[in-house]
Amino acid sequence: METGNEQQGRSSHWEVRTQEQQYAFLPEQPIADKNRYGQLIDLVDLSGLPAGRSMFINENPEVGSNPNRNKQHGFFFTADNCIGCHACEAACSEKNENPAHIAFRSVGYVEGGSYPDYKRMNISMACNHCDDPVCLKGCPTKAYTKHAEYGAVLQDPETCFGCGYCTWVCPYNAPQLDPVKGRVSKCNMCVDRLEVGLKPACVSACVGNALDFGVIENTPQNREQCKTQIPGFPDPEITHPNIRFQQTKTMPIEMNRTDSMPVKYHRDNKGDYKPVIDQKVGKARHWNFSKLNSRENPLVLFTLFAQAALGTFFIPFIGALLGNESLQLFMASDAFLPLCVLAVVMTSFGLFMSVTHLGKPFRFYRGFNNLRYSPMSREGFGLAMFSAGAGLTALFALPGNQWVNQLSTDLIGLNLARLTAELPMQELMIGAGLFALLAGCGGLYYMNKCYQIKARPFWNHWQTATSFVGNSLSLGAFVSGTVVLTALYLMEQSLNAALPIFTLTFISGMLLEGIGLAGHQYDLNRSENEGGAAHYIQSTTFGKTYVLRNWLLGFNILAALGLLALNVVGVNPPLILLLWTGLALLNCFTAAIGRALFYILVIPTTMPGAFFWKNKGFEQHARDIGLANNPATGVAPLAH
């Protein structure tokens, strides 16, 4: 006999499966008004959205029958009961048809003690559908939505262009970037099952009754606790996750991760477990230049070229506005146009490299969809507006360029200077330059905000800002200085007024970066979180490379001071230009090492993995011996 759903051609997801046992159905319990963070549990009251909205699951307009569908739901995990069978993983992956290298829910563990009192605690974790979902605010394409129905944070893989930023900001490793498909997907709370009163697939499959599900803050039957933390779980204050825990068995004072991350967890006086550094690789220093190569290489080039482009345009432009005669002379010369074009080309190349980092590069235009929240959207918009402003500056500089006028006159018989003689081209050029200045500062500010992430303590430090601004000054000074000083030399002008501007700007950038690095090292040496663990890797696995970069930074400053002294004593300008170029190339090498370390070293506040699964060390081993070539191993390719 056909059911009503079959008669109407609706998806079988909407059928209440007759083989489901009673434990698979959502319970009816009294519901609190607010959760422990003070937020309303009734999401209709909170959002003001209509209570009877359809979720259009599988394009089905029917509204679910769950009486609590507009309340915030969440998972409940009883660590005491979890036996590590991975049935929840298997059920989730089967329902969502995930490949072996993607798991919306995964089981890791921490362990401690010694025989005969050795203890291990398993942790099953998926998306926690947080009250303050940082993935939603960070996503530039607006692929995420926080629904009033069940409080589910849903993500649309078809909207995603694969930047992976949500995987950076999430403390729980919930969004999964698939390098094969070039997009992100994640746990959808099984809202299709919730609509017919069933618990999510992972909960129904749990063998040990470790997972449960329901309206948040409702403690399931036969449970004693409803905590927000257990060993290995990141700080819930980052996102206010909708997951609650029970863990009553006594655990050792120190719990270790079996994956390669140099972090373990130590119990404080209050009984809470906090991350501390686990010196898994010893204290020996190494070079490991080959390991500086990563899938973030396009972002290394993007940030360095964009920052250099800003400094290239800003330094001579601001110097001319402030009355430096040599820079005013340069701005009035034919060489100013190529400088503006160079800044546009450098920015465009940087933006192009950021596009190549995407899993779906041809969807790059979606990066401006979330200007309301996403610092990544604002960063890209600011840099695009800077490029437009610098381009307009170049456009308004065209009539004053003798080479352009001569070329246009010879080719088409049109003299641009005469054509625009009645227009205030100088004022328009300065106005466009000021617009580029404001847009570029905005782009640089939001570039810094992109990395001020609580889930990545190594980045979440003021040193990130000093690094970005310092590189903009130092790299911009050498590029613009090379152009300006060469132009002044060819115009037979003295370099004495201009060289100190670029040299001192270069030194300022180096000093700013050095101060930031000193503060970063000071703070992380005293930190026991993942930021301190990242610094431990920086000082050991990449210890010699790190020291080399720091020595080069100091040498660059001393060399710049020496170059300034040579100019004062009257060394020939060609030699000055040659030494300046050599110093510039050395600074490029220094900046490239520093930025590669910036991306390689960061350790996120993610959940513990297992000895094989979700273990970066095992993944690298599998690639080294060829095991990763077998798709069943579950090791994703390195391509982004």
Image: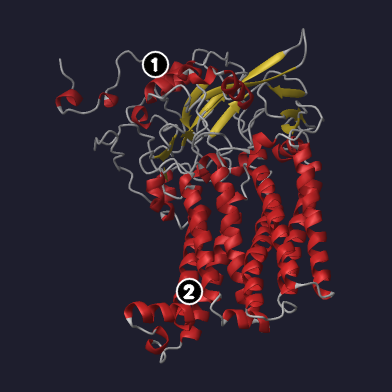
Q: Which residue is identified by label 2?
A: 394
Q: Which label was assigned to residue 531?
A: none
Q: Secondary structure at mark 1?
A: helix
- Colouring of the image: secondary structure
Residue drawn 76% across and 42% down? Answer: 546
Under mark 1, the amino acid is Gln
Q: Which residue is identified by label 1?
A: 22
Q: Secondary structure at mark 2?
A: helix
**Residue 630, position as x, y percentages in the image:** 48, 17
In the rendered view of the protein, which quadrant contains the N terminus? top left
Front-lying residue, 272 or 119: 119
Front-lying residue, 318 or 566: 566
Can residue 374 be seen?
Answer: no
Left or right? Give the position of 345 relative to 98: right
Eyeballing the image, is 295 above or below 5? below
Most extreme residue toward the bottom, as rendered?
422
**Residue 309, position as x, y percentages in the image:** 57, 62
Can residue 89 be seen?
Answer: yes
Question: For residue 409, what is the image quadrant?
Answer: bottom left
How many discs appear? 2
Question: For residue 307, what is the image quadrant?
Answer: bottom right
Label 2 vs 1, first from the N-terminus: 1
Instruction: Using the numbered discs, state the Cα–Cα distance from disc 2 to disc 1 in whole angstroms.
Output: 72 Å
Residue drawn 61% across and 30% down? Answer: 607
Eyeballing the image, is 366 above or below 631? below
